Image: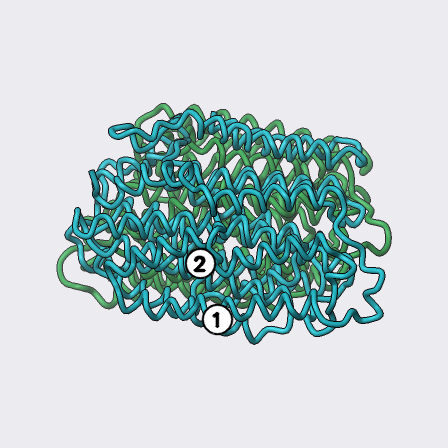
Chain colours: A green, B cyan
Amino acid sequence: MPIGDVLPEISVLVSAVVLLLAASFMRQQDHWRLAIGALASLFAAAVLCALQLGEPARLTFAGVWALDGASIWARLLILATTAICVALTPEWLRSDRRHGEYYAMLLLAALGAMLLAGAADLLQLVMAVLLSSVTGYTLAAYHRAWPLSVEAGMKYFLVGALTNTLLMIGVTLLFGLFGSTDYAQIAKAATGAPQIMALIGLTLVVVGVAFKLAAVPAHTWMPDVSEGAPPPAAAFLTVAPKIGAAIALARLVTIFPADVVAWRPLVATLAVATMTIGNLGALGQSDVRRLLGWSSISQSGYALMAVTAVGLNAQAIPALLFFLGAYAAANLAAFAAVTQLRGRTNLADYRGLATARPGIAAVLVVSFLSLVGIPPLGGFVGKLALFVTTIEAGYAWLAVIAVINTVVSLVYYLRVLGPVYFGDLDGPVPVLGGWAQKALYLATLLTIGLGILAEPLWSELGRVMLLP
Amino acid sequence: MLTLTILVPLIGALAILYVNEDRCRKVACVLGAIPLLLLIIAWIGFDTGAGAPVFQWVESYPWIPSLGVGWRMGVDGIALAIATMSALLFVAAIAWPAETQGRPRQYYAWFLFLEAVSLGVFLTLDLLLFYVFFDLSLVGLFFLIGRWGHGDAQRAALKFFVYTFAGSLAMLLAIIALVLTTDPVTFDMRELIARQPLAGMDVRGALVLLGFVIGLGIKTPFVPLHTWLPPAHVDAPGPASAILAGVLLKMGTYGLIRIPFSMMSATFARYAFALGIVAVVSILWGALVAMAQRDLKRRIAYTSVNHMGYSLLGIAAAGALVGGGEQAARQMALTGATVEMVAHGLITGSLFLICGVFWQRGREYDLQTYGGLAQVAPRLTGFAVLASFASLGLPGLAGFVAELQIFVGTFGVYPWLAAIGLVGILITAALFLQMLQQLFFGELPARWSDFSDLGRVETRMLTVLAVLVVVIGIYPVWLLTLINSTTAVLTGGP
């Protein structure tokens, strides 16, 4: 067995177990030390992952595990995201009795997302979705004494249970049609005339992945989780599973030739619906955390644009990865700001924030403008890459719809920034502490850096391959 | 050197956040004046002789080479003239004694930031960088209007940002569609002008042109894309209004010349007549609606729509044919359009600064409440009269030079459009004279008996702008030589 190929995953898994054991033996007030342990293990996994970059792209473990540029970069991104989320946590859970276990759960959730990114087999995909979901429910409902958190977890679970079932029905159909769950084998079998059953099976699987991506039609859990989950967990759940799911989706759909299974119109439709519904949902929100949830749905819609174009030109996967990276940095910065503000969520409470906390206000500006795609921030380069790849692929209409959506999104981001800068302050603005602050500024710097210093990463991503 | 022109105010914008509050304005003035100095040096060193390169002071550094994007700077005559005017207007706006509402640092920081990115729009030779600066100018003005505006400032700022951002994105799509036709992909404006990448592509060319016209048209703005302009102007603080009218609107017309006019001249020529009609509609609509306004600032805002219409008419006439046909007339129209941009910047900039005086003293823009101010504020009256006359196109002032050339040039290409457009000048004359009469003559209402005249700094700033308006009106050769060196090339002349 080529154990070396999954060393990063093994190291995350082992660390999770060690952290869990350690948490049960340590005093509660020392649990913050486990955050350092988690950071160290994430760093180790990232190094192991980066070492794989030099090797040629290949499928291992009998073809179920893809080791290509797309999966390696996505997993690096997930590890970095998780690290920032870990740094947001110690002060937030300081008084929580189960503080230490949280890190173990977070690492397992990260593992689920990583498995999604590398899945090259339908059963492997199912396993990754399940691991990522089960841990996700727990993270969302971590404040079990707070009704909103429990409600978020419950809703997440119900939507998840339904879509996971659909996913498995889809997998069964595809297995029955093509006689294999292995992507490479399916790709070989899926030739010839258009197949309606294959399209139905694929649609069901896509819905299952869309749940992890918070894309239409399985997006409804996202605003509730974003509002009810502890902000550090919300930061994680709005970002990490999406990265894995987007790559998993791209890998899944490309195994079918577009003339056998018409997946491009399917994904394009989902993209349009997701970005539009996400933006319309965000428009009326007066709750910042909910608003971020809806905005994160619309961002999934933009990511789906790149998936639509996969295979039509070489830039689709680099554009997808870059966009995900920029989105991750900006969204983490936004949630870090909310966390640092002790979860302040009512829009009216943000009035005059710039007077009391100019630094956090500036972070909100940078992260929101990056999510809109204002240059020279990371989000701009990401969106530019998306537009370029969709227009080049002949989907100019999709780019036009994305542009209209972007204009709409500007309205609700400005509805937050307006009071922050133009309103009058009432009352003190307490903040959380040093850990969260460092995470906050790190995410902000990444958001800016991805824009201004886009070249090294972009040219590196230009060589990325997607198997099979 | 052009890079410095942008970097100095940009870094200054950060640095000023750490300057003592009392000295903020002085420091900002110095930092804001440096780009002006640099641009004047660039002007002196600009070679206008025959055979000189079109773009001078060129600098180029890679930024995202794999996308063909670079930090490319350079100017031709048109860009240099407009950029220098903008830098001057920024100095005036920054030096203007503003109500900073207890946040002088942020106020001046945003102004310097806006100066840097606005100059960037005119000085860059990279299409993507053009877009970057174009967008950032929105961010800068959004905060200036929203934070330091009055009335329903938040709403006006939001409307301004969303409306013009929609335009930017339309332009972004057009830019991408234009650039993707080159191989390897490049955003270098010089390359794109030389290659004319859309020549022979009818449908794609028309769509790309439509994207540019919508994007730049919202910014210019022409009717019917102008509705964001009046609220943004009315609720903005005086200096920000001056910048909005004097600098930001120019980005629209300048962009039209720089991008569709130069990079896709065949497509532009095909639709030039339609643009000419839009221009005439803007001229008439802007003038008529301005006439109906009782609000001082709204009235001047609508005259901007009218004046930018002249500029657009000149550009449309100049781009009507490809090659050398009617070259003299077309060159004249394009030169006129550029001079109109410079003149409008100076004149309307002064007018909006003067509006700021009315708000600071009286908290009132309603024309009807004023009257007889000539008795108490002679200096203010003098500047307002001069600027108004210049704006309505009195011979001997800058506006006349511009409008004469535009109309003479347009007569050579589209005589009917020029004839209809002339009506606009008549209406503007009426509306400005009526406005002056209402404000400064007649009986002085009792509540304005202690209306104070212009202060020292205000007088000085308006004097500089007024002197330039007069100089361009009487002796425009220095400006025309610079602009003609470029418009000759653009219209296919010798």
Q: Work out whether A165 lies above or below A45.
A: below
Tag 1 secondary structure:
helix
Image quadrant holding the C terminus of chain B, namely top left
Residue A241 numbered tag: none
Q: Chain of mark 1?
A: B
Say which residue appears at 24% left-offset and 46% top-offset. B491
Q: Work out whether B449 lies above or below B262.
A: below
3D distance between C-alphas at marks 1 and 2 = 15 Å
**Position of B77 compared to A86: left or right?**
left
Q: Nearer the viewer, residue B146 or B301?
A: B301
* Residue type highlighted by circle 1: Ile
Give coordinates of residue B154: x percent, y percent: 67, 61
Say which residue appears at 82% left-offset and 44% top-offset. A95
Residue annotated with mark 2: B308
Give coordinates of residue A195: x percent, y percent: 20, 65
* Residue type highlighted by circle 2: Met
Residue annotated with mark 1: B427
Q: Work out whether A450 lies above or below A426.
A: above
Examine the rendering and report whether any part of residue B299 can be seen. yes
Give coordinates of residue A220: x percent, y percent: 54, 66
Say which residue appears at 58% left-offset and 55% top-offset. B387
Q: Nearer the viewer, residue B36 or B427?
A: B427
Q: Nearer the viewer, residue A193 or A267?
A: A267
Give coordinates of residue B450: x percent, y percent: 85, 60
| Disc 1: CA contacts within 10 A as few (<14), some (14-19) or many (>=20) | some
